[in-house]
Image (spheres, grey):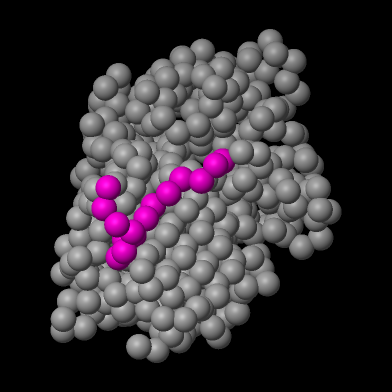
Amino acid sequence: MNNTNISIIPAPKKMRLTKGFFALDSNSRIRNNRVLDTSANQFRKFLKEMTGIAVSRKSSSAGIGNIIKLELSSSDGDINRESYELKITPSAIFIKAPAAAGIFYGIQTLMQIIMSCPASAASCVNLPCLEIEDAPRFEWRGFMLDSSRHFQDIATIKKLIDALAFYKINRLHWHFIDGQSWRFKSEKYPGLADFISGISTEKGCYTVKQMRDVVQYAAERHIVVYPELEMPGHSRAALTIKPQLKCHGISDNAVVNEYCLGRAATAKFHKEIIREIATIFPAPYIHLGGDEASDANWKSCKYCKAAMIKNGLENTALLQKDFMKKMAEYVHSMDKISIAWADKLALGIPAGQIVQGWSDNDNGNESYNAAVKGFKTINSYHRGVYFDYPQNADEDKYQWMIDLPIEKVYAFDPVPAGLSPEQEKLVLGSEACLWTELVPQEKVFRKVFPRLLAFAEIVWSEKSKLNFEDFSKRSAIHCGIFTKSGYN
Ligand SMILES: [Zn+2]
């Protein structure tokens, strides 16, 4: 077999080919510590499905030949818990890491090597001997899925999680509340999930049980799922069901996107939702939305005006900031970190919050501005990672969307140019965002692939490793794999 077929995405930090082959066949055995059983079983299942080879568990008393050994190393000090070492020798495969996440990533790499080496008729895969040392460039390697504009069923979300995990993505930001629908079947407020309107008229929402199932499924693949609750804008769906949270004087039938920030009931409602959602998502993060709110109603509402006077807030921007600060503090009181879209950064952010930047509307790249101000940030700059934008000329698009072919994703650096080394450290990473105005469920994977591969590489691999020509060759092999696996 030809070693040049080895096609690992994202590119590992260090890889060295050595002499010989490991023959993977039904006599191969996996040896692992009990705490790594989940990963070992996933690997076993993958092997059976992809190559037909069934491998079993090795008893600890047996010899050392023909084994795949998963081993936790000492995790003292400053070591990156997502790092791993993979060594293939003629007699054994070793995956060693300081934590289960690293073992999992070593297995994903091994799976990719196996997929680049087709099985022979004798149900044996010859794997080239090599040594890999690997660790991610960024701790935050996220994907945002909009399940509000269009609904995705649980099977599709799990299939997406499989693909994310295969490329070492470690965050799923789940956006299931927006103006068009509220897809969280809250047990406290079940009626909120009844309103579906606008772009997507599909019914569908997620029960608490289904959400827990997604969280668990992702956790087994080392992906943290965290929820986004939209406020104070993008809230038409909730306000249609709960018109008593609109500003004073607005009829129940009027289309309104912003909550009244002067009514005590608004804060009470959001705290109840935050409390409920915190019991479903064990993630240490809750995203509070926070962008694109109009202040038109706040200016004339008697409750909003009274709140501004009472709290000494000079304008509606400060009223909004004050409300978002209270919600952030509530999240922080539960030992979780709040995240919000960059909005009015000049007015500051609640202490401890993470800013997610996307636009360059006002004053340059928002994540750049956030880092300059000393805030931690996730850089989802739309010209680099908005996967709702078309990658080919024949795709539907809105007028505001630029073309975003894979080359542009690959050329995007999550660290904006011009930051000092200290400011650069505030850029935690990036999140590719799939807004679904134009993306019904059946088009999800057409939007995700192949750009996800480019994204995975820019958030994992060292900048010095990035080479689009080399990446293109590797990604061509992967696209063939995914077409075979039933992705569109
Ligand atoms: Zn109001």
**On the picture, is 259 further left or further right than 243?**
right
Above or below residue 113? Residue 274 is: above
**On the picture, is 174 further left or further right than 368?**
left
Pinpoint residue 259: horizontal percent, then vertical percent: 49, 28
Depth check: give the residue in front, 262 or 109. 109
Total residue callouts? 0
User: Within the image, what quadrant is residue 394 found in?
Assistant: bottom left
Depth check: give the residue in front, 423 or 180. 423
Depth check: give the residue in front, 135 or 89. 89
Pinpoint residue 326: horizontal percent, then vertical percent: 60, 20
Bounds of the magenta segment: 61-75
Above or below residue 288? Residue 414 is: below
Query: In the image as oriented, which residue stretches furthest toward the bottom?
Result: 2
Per the image, is 393 magenta? no
Q: Looking at the image, which residue is at 64% across and 65% down? A: 462
Above or below residue 82? Residue 477 is: below
Pinpoint residue 419: horizontal percent, then vertical percent: 80, 55
The quarter of the rendered structure image containing the N terminus is bottom left
Above or below residue 318? Residue 380 is: below
